[in-house]
Amino acid sequence: MYEILEITIHKNHLARISFLSDNPSKCYYKDNHFKLVYFKPIHVFLTPFSHSGINLAIREKESNVKGWELVRMNAINLADNKLIAFLEGLELQALAKQKQGRPLTLNDWLLEKVCYGIDTEEDTTAFIKLLYFNGYDPSNIIELFAKLVTRTDLALHFINELNKITKEGESDTTTIKERHTACA
């Protein structure tokens, strides 16, 4: 089952998402805000955020829209690559603003990963974001990942996500690969 992306944006920021006219979906309006509703592609891993006048909520089903006026009666569409890339960029900016150097609380999810390992791409992405935005250095994240991973085929996904999140990009890919190999 698809999850729902609810993007709430003030009408003054609509120009930033003009590319959505190529992929219209259901839309609501209330108090100078638009709520756009899309299905989240299965292999996309986003976290809810609020940044630069745009709020992203991720839900199992469409939220209560009582008080919102339906302004576009289209069927809910699957979010396209342009929208996902835009949201991922905003998510990284929002998370980077929240980055803090603080110890992690061993919650249920993290305890499960420590006990049983990381075995999905979604877990891999969530693990990287959790550690990086709590102040962990990429080399520490690599070491921890190497100790917790149960599927070695996740290594490429791990490297790509770590590069994207830490913004080390193409120029440092080799260095990260070398560090990962040294830790594995």
Image (cartoon, rainbow, N blue to C red):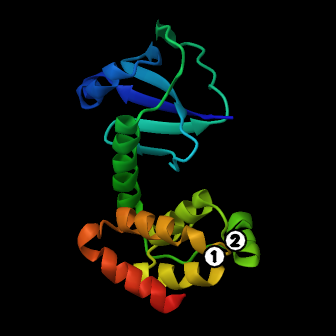
Relative to 151, 140 lies left or right: left
Residue 86 visible (yes or no): yes
Which secondary structure lies at badge 2?
helix
Q: Amino acid at mark 2?
A: Lys
Q: Residue 114: percent from the left, percent from the top?
A: 70, 77
**Disc number for residue 89:** none
Q: Residue 123: percent from the left, percent from the top?
A: 61, 62
Within 10 Å of the Cα at label 1, are there few (<14), some (14-19), or many (20+) other Cα atoms?
Answer: many
Q: Amino acid at mark 1?
A: Val
Relative to 30, 121 lies left or right: right
Q: Residue 66: percent from the left, percent from the top?
A: 60, 14
Q: Are circles 1 and 2 on residues that touch, CB within 8 Å? A: no
Give the residue displayed 36% in from the left and 44% down from the top: 85
**C-alpha distance separating marks 1 and 2:** 9 Å
Give the residue displayed 51% in from the left and 89% down from the top: 183
**Disc number for residue 113:** 2
Number of marks in the image?
2
Quadrant where the image shows the N terminus: top right
**Residue 97: quarter of image:** bottom left
Which secondary structure lies at badge 1?
loop
Vertically, is 37 above or below 82?
Answer: above
In the foreground, 59 or 103 = 59
Relative to 6, 64 lies left or right: right
Residue underneath mark 1: 149
Residue 137 visible (yes or no): no
Vertically, is 77 above or below 164?
Answer: above
Label located before the other in sequence (1 or 2): 2
